[in-house]
Amino acid sequence: MDVKDIKADVVHDVTGTFCPVPVAETAKQIKEMEIGQILELIADDPGVVEDIPAWCKATGQEFLGMYEEDGEYHLFVKKIRETK
């Protein structure tokens, strides 16, 4: 399946913000979501390309992939466990 075909349950736009805001906002959103739901994070900070997959690995969430379009990054994270 193409990453662009992923249907997110929650879309969170953090364009115009820079590290550590996108990661902090991802953590906050994931905490409020149900297990199995998918978050689409939209950001224009190139740091998210490394930061969000690393955050997923550290917290046990599933990074589904990303694509870049017109200078915006669309990253998909599936909640697979509760976070502290």
Image (spheres, rainbow, N blue to C red):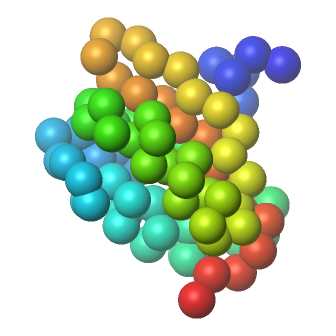
Which residue is depicted at the point 55% across and 76% down? 32
Asked if one can make out residue 8 in the rendered structure from this viewpoint, the answer is no
Residue 43 quadrant: top left
In the displayed structure, would residue 44 be above or below residue 70? below
Residue farthest toward the left in the current orientation of the protein: 16
Q: Which quadrant of the rendered structure holds the C terminus?
A: bottom right
Q: Nearer the viewer, residue 76 or 37?
A: 76
Q: Which quadrant of the rendered structure holds the N terminus?
A: top right
**Left or right of residue 36: residue 11:** left
Asked if one can make out residue 65 in the rendered structure from this viewpoint, the answer is yes
Q: Nearer the viewer, residue 58 or 4?
A: 58
- The percent coordinates of residue 38 (x first, y second) are 68, 51
Which residue is depicted at the point 34% across and 23% down? 72
Residue farthest toward the bottom in the current orientation of the protein: 84
- The percent coordinates of residue 70 (x first, y second) are 32, 10
- The percent coordinates of residue 25 (x first, y second) are 37, 63
In the displayed structure, would residue 14 be above or below residue 83? above
- The percent coordinates of residue 11 (x first, y second) are 49, 46
Which residue is depicted at the point 41% across and 28% down? 73
**Left or right of residue 75: residue 2:** right
**Left or right of residue 66: residue 3:** right
In the displayed structure, would residue 2 be above or below residue 16? above
Residue 35 quadrant: bottom right
Which residue is depicted at the point 53% across and 60% down? 55
